[in-house]
Amino acid sequence: MREHTLPVIGRVHSPYADKFAVPRQPNLAPHALSSLELFAPYGSPSACEGLAGFSHLIVFFVFHQVAPYAGEHSFKSKVRPPRLGGNERVGVFASRSPFRPSRLGMSVVELLGLECRQGLMWLKLGGADLVDGTPVVDIKPYLPFADSVPSAHSGYVDSRPGGMSVRFTPQAQADLQDLGADKLQALTEILSQDPRPAYRGTGADEHRYGALIYGYDLHFKIEGDELVVLDAPKKG
């Protein structure tokens, strides 16, 4: 068997309008809240019975903004992980790159609540690293005794990435005045991960970058070890 079709059981609603600035791993921006809308028939309340007793979930999803391979001959066996600066290559199966044969991803996220809307379940998630509209193909409860291996080795990914200092200019503060304290904290966590392409390095960078988050068109640059948000007009 060379191919298998997976049903899409739901979709994610998140602050990230596109893949730029999405944290590269889950739980790096824990205050960034998302929701998972489950479709019929998978979203019936009975399908989620007992789920509220778990603090975290494993979400299996599709990298839908990545084009699928056109065929087996277009398969790329090497990728450039951001943790290696975006220049050094490793085997695709030694990475969490979205550029993989199945386009399948997996994230451990916090389950903050469940809500039934018009007979279908919605799950409130914390720390998800998922683009808005991401198709979900399965969810499973996270089991610490089985899924956490304290003695595990993580290859070239030797530590949690460090955060940058984030500063908002007066113009950016004015643009974001209606965002609210919780979302502003989440936005700071998101930007502190330095969303620039890895090949840009870690130093000062006069290039002006943009990211669509929470419906705002944020523009920022790097000054020393500080990310400076220049302005953030409301999109649309």
Image (tube, helix red, strand yellow):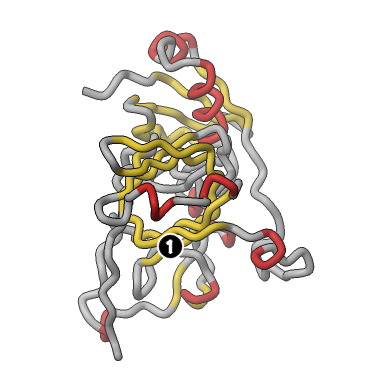
Residue drawn at (37%, 41%) of the image: 122
* Local crowd size for mark 1, using a 10 Å CA cut-off: few (<14), some (14–19), many (≥20): some
Vertically, is 97 above or below 29?
below
Q: Nearer the viewer, residue 87 or 82?
A: 82
- Which residue is at a point 44% across and 44% down the rendered structure image? 22
Tell whether 20 sits left or right of 27.
left
Residue 59, position as x, y percentages in the image: 46, 56
- The image quadrant that residue 83 belongs to is bottom right
The residue singled out by tag 1 in the image is 105
For numbered disc 1, what is the local secondary structure?
strand
Give left or right: position of 141 versus 118. right
Give the residue at the far right of this rendering: 151
Q: How many marks?
A: 1
Quadrant containing the C terminus is top left
Rendered residue at 72%/70% (across/down)? 153
Q: Is residue 178 above or below residue 33?
A: above
Query: Which of the 4 image quadrants contains residue 225?
Result: top right
Report the amino acid beneath label 1.
Gly
Work out which quarter of the rendered image holds the N terminus and state it. Answer: bottom left
**Who is closer to the viewer here, 75 or 227?**
75
Residue 63 at what x, y percent from top left? Answer: 34, 59
Where's residue 205, x and y in %? 50, 37
Vertical relation: 104 (above or below) 199? below
